[in-house]
Amino acid sequence: MITPLHIVAAIPLKIAAPKQFSLFWFSITNILIDVEVLYYMILLEWPIHRFFHSLIGVSIIGISCFILSIILKQKKLPSFFGCFIGVYSHYVIDGFYHNLWT
């Protein structure tokens, strides 16, 4: 699924819990995950969903972004939810959409 569609899917969550959820960190994590796809598409190498579309890969991105949000003195709870809902929802949506779990 294309990154903007992942981000649009989070808007109802932001509306329901505006102070507890960071759409910014949700978006950053989803963009970072799909940089890998862009890289392999440019190289014309398949499969394009590799390490950063695995459970370990998305976890590394989520943890890294959350640490960065703390360094940048962002609010911890909204950043935490934005980062981790972002990476794990991306993992689940792409897992089903691209049949990555076979």
Image (cartoon, rainbow, N blue to C red):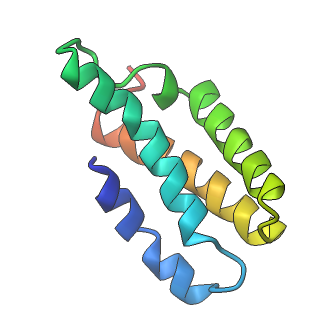
Task: Give the total number of marks visible in the rendering.
Answer: 0
- What's the residue at 70%, 85% (across, down)? 19
Residue 16 in the image: above or below residue 36: below
The answer to which of 99 and 24 lies nearer the viewer is 24
Q: Residue furthest front?
A: 72
Residue 79 in the image: above or below residue 2: below
- Left-right relation of 32 to 44: right
Residue 13: quadrant of the picture: bottom right
The answer to which of 45 and 70 lies nearer the viewer is 70
Residue 11 in the image: above or below residue 60: below
Residue 16: quadrant of the picture: bottom right
- Left-right relation of 97 to 34: left
- What's the residue at 50%, 28% (across, down)? 52
Q: Position of residue 91 (x, y in %)?
A: 49, 41
Report if residue 89 is visible in the image: no
Q: Position of residue 5 (x, y in %)?
A: 30, 60
Residue 98: quadrant of the picture: top left
Q: Position of residue 37 (x, y in %)?
A: 32, 30
- What's the residue at 22%, 12% (across, down)? 45
- What's the residue at 52%, 54% (across, down)? 28
